[in-house]
C-alpha cells in the first residue's frame, strides 16, 4: 500500500510540475525572470486553473523522495535529472540545492554500503558543482551573456560568484544584527506564531503572517533597492529574541539529531519519506525563513497518510469480504 500511495501522488503531480517548469522557461525567454515571478504571484491569487496545477505539483518532491526510499531509482534518477535541468533553466536555484543535499543524505544512509575516499570526494565534487552551477543560473536569469567567455574565465567567474552568492547569507544575518533593535524592533516570537497561522487559509487569518512581516521583507531595503535580502534560521532567531536566541540553538540541534534518527531508524517507508521531506524543507532555512515549513508539511504530506490508510482500509474490507464468501 505504501508503494501504491507514493505512485498515486507521483503520477498526479509529475505532469503539473513539469508543465509549470516548462511555462516558466517560456515566460523567462519572453518577459524575463523578474516579470515572470511577479506574474506568478498575481496568478496564484484566488482559485483558478494555475493554482490547481501549483497545488498538485507540490506533491512532486515528497513523491520523488518516496521513489528513492522504495528503491525505484530507475524511475527516480532520470526524472530527477530532467527536473534539475528544467528547474535551473526556469531561473530558480535554492530548492534544487536542498534537493541535492537530501539526495546525498539518502545515498549516504540507504545506498552507500561502505564509505571510501573516492565516494566521499565524488559527493563533495557534486556538492561543489551544484553551488557552482547556481551562479550561472543567476547570470542566465539576469540575461547576461557568458557564451563568449573562455573556460578559464568561466572558472574564475564561477569561483568569484560562488563566494559572492554565499556571502549574501551572512550579509542578511549581519544586517539583522546591525538594525535590531536600533532601527527595527524585535519581533518577539511573532514570526514563529505566523508559522502556525500560515497553516490556515489566508482568508481565515486575514493575512496575519504577512502583516507581521519577515526578515526577508522587513530588512530588504537595508541591503538592496531592488529585491529581498533572503534570510536564515539564525537571522530569524535573532530578529525574534535577540541574543537570547542562542538558547534556542541547542534545541534546534537536538531536533536535528532526532530527525536524523527518525529517518534512518524508521521501519516504515512512508515515515522515512516523511522524515526526508521534513529534512528537505528544513535545509531551506539555510537561505530562508521557516514560516512556511509547517504549512508545507501538513498540506503536502498529511494527504499521503490519508490515502495510505484509506487504501489499507479498502484492502482490509476486500479481504474480509472474500473470507465471508469462502
Image (spheres, helix red, strand yellow):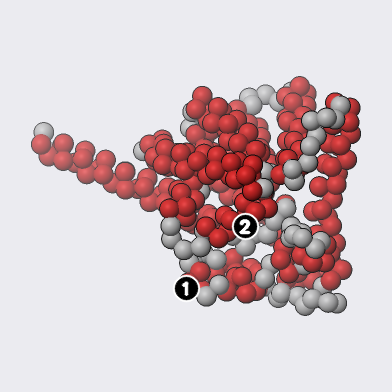
Q: Is residue 7 visible?
A: yes
Name the spot of residue 46 as percent of width and height, x first.
46, 63
Q: Quadrant of residue 296?
A: bottom right
Name the spot of residue 71 as percent of width and height, x first.
50, 29
* Element assignment for label 2: helix
Q: What residue do we see at 43% from left, 53% from top?
A: 49
Q: Quadrant of residue 8?
A: top left
Q: Residue furthest left?
A: 325
Q: Residues within 10 Å of mark 1 (few under 14, many from 20)?
A: few
Report the front residue among 305 and 84.
Answer: 84
Q: CA distance from mark 2 to mark 1?
A: 24 Å
Q: In the displayed structure, would residue 295 be above or below residue 318?
A: below
**Number of numbered discs present?**
2
Q: What residue do we see at 89% from left, 34% from top?
A: 156
Q: Earlier in the sequence, mark 2 or mark 1?
A: 2
- Foreground mark, 2 or 1, reads 2
Name the spot of residue 137 as percent of width and height, x first.
72, 40
- Residue located beneath label 2 in the image: 38
Q: Residue furthest front?
A: 30
Name the spot of residue 140 as percent of width and height, x first.
73, 40
Q: Which label belongs to residue 204?
A: 1
Relative placement, left or right, of 115 versus 44 is right
Q: Where does the N terminus fall, quadrant-wise?
A: top left
* Element assignment for label 1: helix
Amino acid at each position: 500500500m505504501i508503494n501504491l500511495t507514493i505512485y498515486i501522488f507521483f503520477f498526479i503531480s509529475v505532469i503539473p510540475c513539469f508543465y509549470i517548469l516548462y511555462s516558466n522557461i517560456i515566460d523567462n525567454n519572453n518577459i524575463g525572470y523578474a516579470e515572470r515571478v511577479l506574474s506568478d504571484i498575481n496568478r496564484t491569487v484566488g482559485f483558478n486553473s494555475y493554482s490547481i496545477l501549483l497545488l498538485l505539483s507540490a506533491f512532486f518532491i515528497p513523491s520523488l523522495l518516496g521513489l528513492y526510499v522504495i528503491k525505484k531509482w530507475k524511475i527516480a534518477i532520470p526524472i530527477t535529472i530532467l527536473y534539475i535541468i528544467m528547474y535551473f533553466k526556469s531561473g530558480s536555484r535554492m530548492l534544487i540545492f536542498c534537493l541535492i543535499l537530501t539526495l546525498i543524505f539518502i545515498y549516504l544512509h540507504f545506498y552507500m554500503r561502505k564509505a571510501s575516499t573516492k565516494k566521499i570526494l565524488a559527493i563533495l565534487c557534486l556538492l561543489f558543482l551544484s553551488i557552482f552551477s547556481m551562479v550561472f543560473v543567476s547570470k542566465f536569469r539576469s540575461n547576461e551573456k557568458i557564451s563568449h567567455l573562455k573556460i578559464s574565465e568561466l572558472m574564475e567567474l564561477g569561483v568569484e560568484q560562488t563566494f559572492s552568492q554565499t556571502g549574501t547569507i551572512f550579509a542578511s544575518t549581519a544586517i539583522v544584527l546591525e538594525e535590531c533593535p536600533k532601527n527595527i524592533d524585535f519581533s518577539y516570537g511573532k514570526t514563529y506564531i505566523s508559522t502556525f497561522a500560515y497553516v490556515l487559509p489566508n482568508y481565515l487569518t486575514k493575512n496575519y503572517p504577512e502583516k507581521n512581516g519577515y526578515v526577508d521583507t522587513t530588512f530588504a531595503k537595508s541591503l538592496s533597492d531592488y529585491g529581498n535580502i533572503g534570510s536564515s534560521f539564525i537571522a530569524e532567531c535573532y530578529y525574534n529574541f535577540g541574543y537570547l536566541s542562542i538558547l534556542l540553538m541547542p534545541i534546534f540541534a537536538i531536533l536535528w539529531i532526532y530527525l536524523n534518527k527518525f529517518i534512518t531508524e524508521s521501519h516504515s517507508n512512508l515515515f522515512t519519506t516523511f522524515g526526508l521531506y521534513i529534512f528537505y524543507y528544513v535545509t531551506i532555512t539555510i537561505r530562508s525563513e521557516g514560516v512556511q515549513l509547517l504549512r508545507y508539511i501538513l498540506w503536502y504530506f498529511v494527504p499521503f497518510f490519508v490515502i495510505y490508510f484509506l487504501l489499507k482500509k479498502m484492502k482490509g474490507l476486500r479481504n474480509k469480504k472474500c473470507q465471508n464468501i469462502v
